[in-house]
Image (cartoon, rainbow, N blue to C red):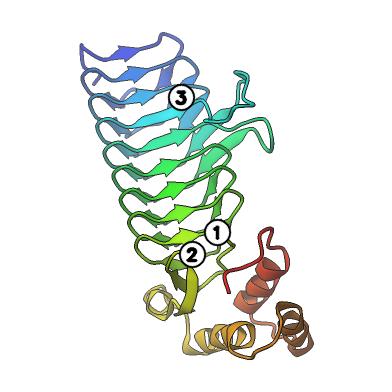
Amino acid sequence: MIHERAEVDSSARLADDVEVGAFSVIGPEVEIGPGTVIGPHVVIKGPTRIGSNNRIHQFCALGEGPQDTGYAGEATRLEIGDNNTFREFCTVNRATTKESWVTRIGNDNWVMAYVHVAHDCQVGSHNIMANATTLAGHVEIGDHVVLGGFSKVHQFCRVGDHAFCGMDNGITRDVPPYLMVSGFPARPHGLNSVGLRRRGFSKETIQAIRHVYRVLYRSGLRLEEALEQLDREADPTPQVRVMREFVRTARRSIVR
């Protein structure tokens, strides 16, 4: 299953059925789970753990040290879950020592060509990152997020669950869950209603989320005033609580 022209370090731990293509290099302290297929000309450095049934296409570089001038060779990590696809020329860096020491990508993500995930990023599951999307350091991406081609996300920004970000946008502030944004810098353009319906959200839940959107973006209230109104209403819908908490804890404010 390992091509004779591949180079796999003796300390790397690969499941028996892992496939490794020609001229790929698997370094020390790399662990790869069953069912994963690694194409030709891929470089994976450790400490890195990759789960099961991932597909890593040619010319990807995973687990290289962070592009951070303060990094001094510490044993930070990259962790990738199961059932992810990385298309050609993707790069994912290990973490710095400034937060949790780990860059993490969850499960069932579709990562298209030329995507870059920088150090200390925390990426959830079931996301789509289209061609040439770039995540700067310390970015957090939730679950079921779509980032259009050539999207750029500023360091320390968060993108909430089920958000949809258009093509060639620049995200410089946090994107609350369920929103649709686009532009440079990115601006809100309503709810990701199509995505929510496709994922089985009820009409009542979507209506509750839409009300929060109107309070935040259409009421003319300052952000603090909008949050106060939402707190007074105390809607128990779980998705509404998620939106309120996300906005309240935004590190870089929110797109508005």
* Disc nearer the start of the sequence (3/1): 3
Q: Where residue 222 sits in the image (x, y, percent)?
A: 71, 82
Q: Residue at x 43, y 76 (%)?
A: 192
Depth-wise, is mark 3 or mark 1 nearer the camera?
1
Disc number placed over residue 172 in the picture, else none: 1
Q: Can residue 91 be seen in this view?
A: yes
Q: Is residue 247 above or below residue 206?
A: above
Looking at numbered disc 2 in the image, what kind of residue is underneath it?
A: Pro
Q: How far apart are marks 1 and 2 (CA)?
A: 7 Å
Looking at numbered disc 1 in the image, what kind of residue is underneath it? Answer: Thr
Q: Compared with residue 47, is residue 207 higher up or lower down, i.e. above or below?
A: below
Residue kind at label 3, given as amino acid type: Glu
Q: Which of 4 and 65 is in front in this view?
A: 65
Q: Can residue 179 be seen in this view?
A: no
Seen at 63% across and 91% down, the residue is 219
The alpha-carbon separation of the residues under discs 3 and 1 comes to: 35 Å
Secondary-structure class at tag 2:
loop
Closer to the camera in the image, 188 or 195: 188
- Left or right: where 10 falls relative to 65: left
Q: Answer few, some or many: residues within 10 Å of disc 1's Cα (few below 14, many 20 plus, some between 14 and 19).
A: many
Question: In the drawing, what numbered circle is on residue 185?
Answer: 2
Q: At numbered mark 1, what does the secondary structure look like: helix, strand or loop? A: loop
The location of residue 165, given as percent across then percent down, is 42, 65
| C-beta proximity under 8 Å, tags 2 and 3 | no
Q: In which quarter of the image is the C terminus?
A: bottom right
Q: Which residue is under mark 3?
A: 31
Q: In this view, does 135 lie above or below 103?
A: below
